[in-house]
Amino acid sequence: MNDKNSAVPGAPWWKFGHVWLVLAGPIVVVIAGFITLYLAVSRPDPVVSEDYYRQGIEINKTLEAAPSSLAPAIQARNHAATGVAPAAKPSPQP
């Protein structure tokens, strides 16, 4: 008699594809975590210089003294910082 409830030795768990489908997600996450840990430990963040504010002031001074080719970029930067649109220049009349 072949009964459905009889104990029949089956295949080991690792031979079923669905098991690997379920385990693949967590395994990938653990591997990505170790890669992230390695990158965080091996490449430390650069230290911000002590005089970062003074360096920013110097950059602003060089931008203000720059030729007029940078004028639109400076106006856009100022508009983004203050929210006030620059005054429009009147168009030349023919």
Image (spheres, rainbow, N blue to C red):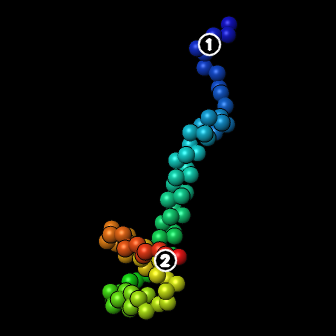
Q: Secondary structure at mark 1?
A: loop
Give the Cα distance between marks 2 and 1: 95 Å
Which label number is shown at residue 15?
none
**Residue denoted by label 1:** 4
Residue 79, by quadrant, is bottom left
Q: Secondary structure at mark 2?
A: loop
Q: Tell me the crowding category of disc 2: few under 14, some 14 to 19, or many 20 or more residues within 10 angstroms, Cα based.
A: few
**Residue denoted by label 2:** 92
Which badge, 2 or 1, comes first in the chain's sequence? 1
Farthest residue to the top: give it. 1
Q: Position of residue 24 (x, y in %)?
A: 58, 45
Q: Residue flagged by tag 2: what amino acid is it?
A: Pro
Which residue is painted at 55% across and 46% down in the image? 25
Between residues 46 and 90, which one lies in front from this camera angle? Answer: 90
Residue 55, by quadrant, is bottom left
Which residue is painted at 52% across and 84% down in the image? 69
Between residues 8 and 44, which one lies in front from this camera angle? Answer: 44
Q: Is residue 86 above or below residue 26?
A: below
Looking at the image, can residue 31 be seen?
yes
Q: Position of residue 93 (x, y in %)?
A: 49, 75
Q: Tell me the crowding category of disc 1: few under 14, some 14 to 19, or many 20 or more residues within 10 angstroms, Cα based.
A: few
Q: Position of residue 20 (x, y in %)?
A: 61, 41
Which residue is painted at 47% across and 90% down in the image? 66
Q: Is residue 10 above or below residue 67?
A: above
Which residue is painted at 48% across and 66% down in the image? 37
Q: Position of residue 53 (x, y in %)?
A: 32, 86
Between residues 26 and 63, which one lies in front from this camera angle? Answer: 63
Left or right relative to 18: residue 87? left
Q: Residue flagged by tag 1: what amino acid is it?
A: Lys
Q: Is residue 39 above or below residue 53?
A: above
